[in-house]
Amino acid sequence: MGSDNADKKFVIALDQGTTSSRAMLVDRQGNIVARMQRQFPQVYPQPGWVEHDPADILSSQLGVLTELLLANNVDASQIDSIGITNQRETTLVWDRETGEPLHNAIVWQCRRTAPMIEDVCGDPDVARMVAEKTGLVPDPYFSASKIAWILDHVPGARERAAAGRLAFGTVDSWLVWKLTYGEVHATDMTNASRTMLYNIHTCEWDPWLLDLFGIPASMMPEVKPSTGFFGVTSNPGIVQGIPICGVAGDQQAALFGQRCWEPGDAKSTYGTGCFLLMNTGPEACASRHGLVTTIAAVAPEVEGVHYALEGSVFMAGALMQWLRDELGILDDVADSSAIAASVPDTEGVYVVPAFTGLGAPWWDAEARGAIYGLTRGAGRAHIVRASLEALAYQVCDLLRAMEEDAGISLRQLNVDGGASANEFLMQFQSDLLNLPVRRPENAEATALGAAYLAGLATGFWSGLDEIRGLGRKEGEFDPSGTDEWRQRLLAGWHDAVGRTRVS
């Protein structure tokens, strides 16, 4: 890119993830023309605890934004707007006067508040009320208990909160606060719906939920639609004057970026975790299978609130990183596809990656990871293959539960995220589901979703029809295998899960 591109305009997507921060330039044709990425440290104070330094989140995100513009000779006059997408549920609390965080961010993976959830929501009537209001299964995964933990464990925090000095935010709120230099304390409806404090039917912070967890309403950010004006960049350390016009949690952004705009459209994102979402339209569909109901991002032209069913796999790409970093049986995660394909099957080996508990449809916070079926003949390739198959099994369980809850049979599954590049995994997923799996040539659906939301707010794109018309190439994996084969493998998987569960 150079001076000949001076008249072109772009939308910037900021994608703040669990292990890295990224910034991307998106043009009018929906192409990602440049990107920057920077990893940042993970903090593990105790087993089952996961934290991030808020300064690392901020510096990595602002750093890649600045590098993106400098490396590509782009100035503020060429940028239409910024869209933000973020790791959800991760919880920050900071002082409104100083802008300083009280504690490290408590990451969505962190399980430290499991005893608090049991204490606060152990009564079945309370748990039912929480689920009815929020669409969520009471779990330490969500933000509410994380906020309460910070207020309980940081000296003087509750006094400062009562005095109105403290602000809570998920990562999007932290970035908006810092990008606008403390002018705007806001979040969007998709992120709010992941806190376990937001009533997804009345679309407001729920006084009963706030009281249940002992959280002052003064800490909560303003909740806005996912597409609209969130302020302008005014932090002295970055390019100033760019409007922030789109915000969505990463999975809802991916649902939007995959163009899953109609009821029954579904996508699976294979990132650090694995997340399957199905658009259910204006219907908030309650699950009978331990899935959660969440708010979906919609375009400005769509009236009212739309919802999605969601199931979460806590360990996806992180499982492959564990094989590389802790077991040392992978030099590069990218090698896993070829290694898995080097053996015809797992020889009966199953990996249940419950490192931080089991998510939907099991919701067992106390379960821990296990490998079953090991024999003397089992080797590296079998464990690698079993690990990849475990991701597909979990997605299959979630998808079947969604189909039953929504009364819809899917025709295909849209996929994205880093691990969607794994050829073995995508083909096995298609075979197991007996459905086509479609992967866009550009797997950055999360960033594109954030960019689309921002650009639709400003008129950079005229509407969904224009975005629908943007060309994109897709790869398709078509299913093979027999029903008997699927049933046999799934029976073995469910047996392994049953052995792993504690509750």
Image (tube, helix red, strand yellow):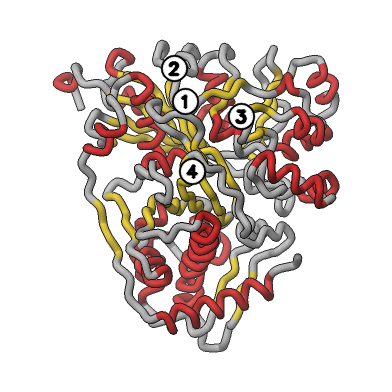
Mark number displayed over residue 238: 2
Confirm whether residue 39 shows in the render. no
Indicate the quadrant containing the N terminus: top left, top right, bottom left or bottom right.
Answer: top left
Q: Are marks 1 and 2 in contact (CB under 8 Å)?
A: yes
Mark 2 → mark 4, Cα distance in angstroms: 27 Å
Question: Which quarter of the figure has residue 163?
Answer: top right
The alpha-carbon separation of the residues under discs 2 and 3 comes to: 33 Å
Image x and y of residue 192, in percent? 60, 32
Q: Is residue 475 left or right of residue 320?
A: left
Q: Earlier in the sequence, mark 2 or mark 4?
A: 2
Q: CA distance from mark 4 to mark 3?
A: 19 Å
Up the image or down, 482 lies above or below 30; here it is below
Give the amino acid at mark 4: Gln
Give the foreground label among 3 and 1.
3
Tell me which label, 4 or 3, sits earlier in the chain: 3
Query: From the viewer's perspective, is the residue at label 4 or at label 3 nearer?
Result: 3
Mark nearer the viewer, 4 or 1: 4
Which quadrant holds residue 376? bottom right
Mark 1 lies on residue: 62
Which amino acid does the dot numbered 2 rest on?
Answer: Ile
Q: Amino acid at mark 1?
A: Leu
- The residue to which callout 4 is attached is 251
Q: Are marks 2 and 4 in contact (CB under 8 Å)?
A: no
- Left or right of 439? Residue 266 is right
Res. 203 mark: 3
